[in-house]
Every structure is written in structure tokens, then in C-alpha cells.
Amino acid sequence: MSELRFVRMGFGAEAVDYQVAWDEQRRVHAARFADEVPDTVLLLEHPPVYTAGRRTADNERPLDGTPVIDVDRGGKITWHGPGQLVGYPIQKLPRPVDVVAHLRRLEEAMIGVCAEFGIETSRVEGRAGVWVLGDPVEQRPALGGLSLDFDPRLTDEEFDPRLNGPEYAPSNAGQRREDRKICAVGIRVAKGVTMHGFALNVNPDVSNFDKIIPCGIRDAGVTSLAHELGRDVTIAEVLPVVERHLQAVLENADLRPRVIEKTPAA
């Protein structure tokens, strides 16, 4: 694959409006499809905004009428805002497109970021993103709230049954308290090029998730690097770590097409 290019669009007082970032995603996506630019990761922070994927129901939107931007990614509704580091990797994938492999690479990179800060995270079966697993039931309860931001059924090109997990099924099977999402992942692949990406909770106000019903899942929570570490963590502190782990995972990824077994001729 090509060398990975990072573009720091704006943070803090220069946070990037969601619509502006979305337009830039589409511009870079078209340029990457035409091989005019290398694989690119847009990194930024958004002003407070709710975005709704294609499967968002009316009753899952903010109850107080807060405006929502409808977007072309999978999943349902989520929140972006201050204290959350957002990354949009725009990468050309080989055909046949393996959406799951791309999703897993983003998760792997963010798991590595969290580990570097001393936080143990994991994947949860049937749910995209990076999670801090809940405590065993005999220990303290975890926080409330939640976000899920991926739909594996956007198009035939993107569908993969390995991601078709039940939305309402408890992920912990009664063995632990609620899991806490620290990084949401929501992606789209069009013309073999990826869009959207991840949102890593560095030090946001997670109460913003309380205004919505994100993905209809009620048995998991939201957390952040700052909450888990019990200290202030800044975007500036996390940004170079994220870039390093994304570079290690995406630049060194084996992007060869999957081997598809042919059915023997009758």
C-alpha cells in the first residue's frame, strides 16, 4: 500500500464543523479513488454534534429536539464533540473488499493506544469498537451510557456475516457488569475506498450520550481515557500516539484480497 499521510485538520478552538469535515472526506475519497493522493487519515476534533447513520429511528434521536446530521455511514446515532479525537482513514482496499479486516485494524490500533496509556481494552463479540470490559459481578458497578456506530449491511460490497451480531443481546452473559465503550468505530466503503472511522474518547463530557438512545443497546456504557486513568488527558498528548499506532497497523497491513474457495465443478 502507499505511505500513510496524516492531516491534522483542527482541534480545540479550531475544531472542525462536521459538515466541513464530511465534505473534505468526500473530496479526499474521490482523489484517493483516482490515485491522485496516497492513503490519508484526517484527524480532528468536532464541535458538539449528533450524527445519525442510516438505521436511526425517530425515537432514538435527542428527546429535546437537538439538531442531528444524517450521514451515509452504518449504525445509528452517536455524539461527537470536545475531548474526543476523531480519525477518518481514507484507504484504498483490494478486491474483494474485506470490511471486517479494515474494522479490525482500526480496533487493533486503538487497543494499542489504550495499552500505551495503561488501559486494558478488548473487543466485544457482535459489537464494533474498543471496550473496557465490565467488572466481575461481585465487584463495583460500571458507568452508564453507550454508543455503537457500525452497520455491516450498508451494501452488498460491505456486508459480512461475521459482523451481524445481535444488537440487544447482552454481551457479558451475566458474568460481569456493563462493558464501557472507549472508542467507537463506524465505517463505510465506496468504490473500494474507506470513509468515516473512529472516535476515541479522550476527555469528553460523556453525559451528552444521555440525550439519545444510541443504537438501542441498553446494557453498556461509555468511558474515556481520562476517566479510566483518573487524571486529565489532552488531545495533544494522545494525538502522536494515535498516529504512531495507526501507521504501524495500516502501513504494515497485509491488504491482499482474501482467498476465495471455488466450488468444485460437478
Image: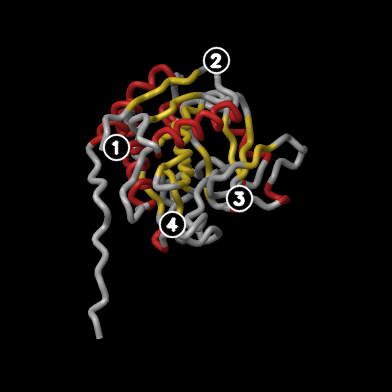
Q: Is residue 91 left or right of residue 27?
A: left
Q: What residue is shown with label 3?
A: 54
Specify how the rendered protein is coloured. Answer: secondary structure
Q: What residue is shown with label 4?
A: 157
The Cα–Cα distance between marks 1 and 4, rounded to whole angstroms, is 21 Å
Q: What residue is shown with label 2?
A: 14
For the question of whether residue 16 can be seen, the reply is yes
Which numbered disc flags the more N-terminal residue, 4 or 3? Answer: 3
Q: Which marked residue is nearer to the observer: mark 1 or mark 4?
A: 4
Q: Residues within 10 Å of mark 2 (few under 14, many from 20)?
A: few
Q: Position of residue 132 (x, y in %)?
A: 41, 42
Type of residue at label 1? Leu
Type of residue at label 4? Glu
Report helix, strand or loop for mark 4.
loop
As drawn, which residue projects farthest toward the right? Answer: 64
Q: Which mark is residue 250?
A: 1
The Cα–Cα distance between marks 2 and 1, rounded to whole angstroms, is 27 Å
Q: Which marked residue is nearer to the observer: mark 4 or mark 3?
A: 4
Camera-nearest residue between 84 and 221: 84
Mark 4 and mark 3 residues within 8 Å of each other at the beta carbon = no
